[in-house]
Image (cartoon, rainbow, N blue to C red):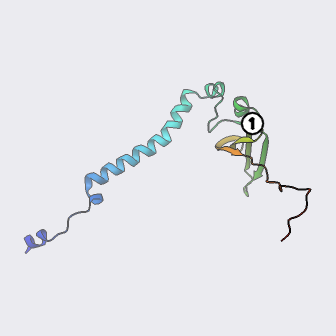
C-alpha cells in the first residue's frame, strides 16, 4: 500500500525544489550584502569625500558644506520640519543648456547630512501659443 502512495505523488514544482530555492536565496543574500557593503567600501576608500569633491560628485552621507564644495550653491532651498522636529531640506540646482532648456538636480538633506537626490533631465520650456493675429478682428462664427 505504501508503494502505491509513492507512485501517485505529484512532481514537485520547479521553484519548490531544494537546489532552486537555495540558488534563489543565495542570489538574494548576495544582492543585499552588496547593496549594504558597496557604499561602505566606497566611503572607506574616501572617508572625507575629498576625491568626490575634486570630481564634482556628491554622495549620500556628505555634509552640506561638502556638497557646497563639490557643486556650489543651489538656486532654491526648501526647508521643512517633521512632526518630530527633524529638519529636512531640498536643494534645487538648475543647469541651463540654453535660453529654453533647463535641467534640474534635487538633493535632500536631513539634519545637515545628504540622504538622497535625483536628476530630472531635460525639461524644455515651450512658449505658449499666441493667437495668430492678436490685434486683428475676431473670426465670425
Residue found at the far front of this picture: 140
Looking at the picture, how far across and down is residue 42, in whole percent? Answer: 53, 32
Q: Which part of the image, by quadrant, shows the C terminus?
A: bottom right
Q: Is residue 39 left or right of residue 52?
A: left
SS under mark 1: loop
Q: Quadrant of residue 104?
A: top right
Q: Is residue 58 above or below residue 32?
A: above
Q: Is residue 116 above or below residue 13?
A: above
Q: Nearer the viewer, residue 1 or 100?
A: 100
**Number of marks in the image?**
1
Looking at the picture, how far across and down is residue 14, in whole percent? Answer: 27, 59
Q: Report which residue position mark 1 lands on.
A: 98
Looking at the picture, how far across and down is residue 39, in whole percent? Answer: 53, 37
For residue 47, say whether it is visible: yes
Q: Which part of the image, by quadrant, shows the N terminus?
A: bottom left
Q: Is residue 139 left or right of residue 52?
A: right
Residue at left 78%, top 49%?
127
Q: Nearer the viewer, residue 67 or 93?
A: 93
**Crowding near pointer 1: few (<14 within 10 Å), some, many (20+)?**
few
Residue at left 74%, top 47%?
125
For residue 109, say whether it is visible: no
Q: Is residue 36 above or below residue 41?
A: below
Residue at left 74%, top 32%?
68
Residue at left 74%, top 39%?
94
Looking at the picture, how far across and down is residue 88, in whole percent? Answer: 73, 48
Amino acid at each position: 500500500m505504501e508503494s502505491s502512495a509513492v507512485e501517485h505523488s505529484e512532481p514537485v514544482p520547479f521553484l519548490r525544489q531544494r537546489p532552486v530555492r537555495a540558488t534563489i536565496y543565495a542570489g538574494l543574500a548576495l544582492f543585499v550584502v552588496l547593496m549594504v557593503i558597496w557604499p561602505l567600501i566606497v566611503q572607506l576608500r574616501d572617508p572625507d569625500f575629498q576625491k568626490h569633491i575634486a570630481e564634482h560628485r556628491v554622495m549620500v552621507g556628505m555634509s552640506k558644506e561638502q556638497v557646497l564644495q563639490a557643486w556650489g550653491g543651489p538656486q532654491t532651498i526648501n526647508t521643512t520640519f517633521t512632526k518630530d522636529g527633524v529638519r529636512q531640506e531640498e536643494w534645487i540646482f538648475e543647469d541651463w543648456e540654453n535660453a529654453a532648456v533647463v535641467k534640474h538636480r534635487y538633493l535632500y538633506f536631513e539634519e545637515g547630512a545628504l540622504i538622497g537626490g535625483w536628476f530630472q533631465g531635460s525639461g524644455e520650456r515651450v512658449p505658449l501659443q499666441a493667437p495668430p493675429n492678436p490685434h486683428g478682428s475676431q473670426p465670425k462664427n
